[in-house]
Image (cartoon, rainbow, N blue to C red):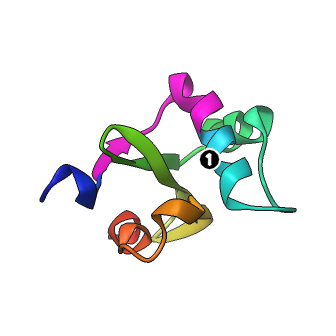
Amino acid sequence: MTATDGTLKPVGPFDLDVLAALSEACFDESRWNRKAVAEVLAMPGAFGVMILVDNAPAGFLLARIAADECEILSLGVQPSYRRRGLARRLLR
């Protein structure tokens, strides 16, 4: 894997601003602000993963586990990084 393939990184409370900016870049009407991202990550079973390309945030996945299921809450890749398989890597 090269840096342009993307590096996966678990997200935490220090990533809220970056996740909100990614959401804004990825979505028009359904974007989440910093507060919404914080509320999601504070839910029981919630987690997130960010994908970095050349150390720049390119996309993210926010999800939560409940019982034996995993629910994807938001998945986005910035338009300039789309069509490279980054969302597929986030889903794996």
Q: Residue furthest right?
A: 29
Q: Residue furthest top?
A: 14
* Number of other residues with Cα within 10 Å of mark 1, as a class: few under 14, some 14 to 19, many 20 or more: many
Residue at (32%, 70%) from the top-left corner?
Answer: 92
Residue 8 within the magenta-colored segment of the rendering: yes
Residue at (55%, 58%) from the top-left corner?
Answer: 63
Residue at (60%, 40%) from the top-left corner?
Answer: 19
Query: Would you identify the image quadrant in which residue 27 lies?
Result: bottom right
Q: Indicate the position of residue 71 as horizontal and vertical percent values.
A: 57, 68
In the rendered image, the vertical position of residue 57 relative to residue 77, given as above or below: above
Q: Indicate the position of residue 72 as horizontal and vertical percent values.
A: 57, 67
Most foreground residue, 80 or 45 = 80
Judge left or right: residue 78 versus residue 24: left
Q: Secondary structure at mark 1?
A: helix
Residue 66 appears anywhere in the view: no
Residue 57 appears anywhere in the view: yes
Most foreground residue, 3 or 23 = 3
In the rendered image, the vertical position of residue 16 relative to residue 29, given as above or below: above
Residue 63 within the magenta-colored segment of the rendering: no
Q: Quadrant of the N terminus?
A: bottom left
Q: Which residue is mark 1?
A: 22
Q: Residue furthest left?
A: 1
Amino acid under label 1?
Leu
Q: How many numbered marks have been drawn onto this rendered protein structure?
A: 1
Most foreground residue, 44 or 60 = 60
In the rendered image, the vertical position of residue 70 relative to residue 53, given as above or below: below
**Region of the chain picked out in magenta, as a range:** 7-18
Residue at (53%, 49%) from the top-left corner?
Answer: 45
Judge left or right: residue 49 versus residue 55: right
Q: Indicate the position of residue 51 as horizontal and vertical percent values.
A: 39, 51
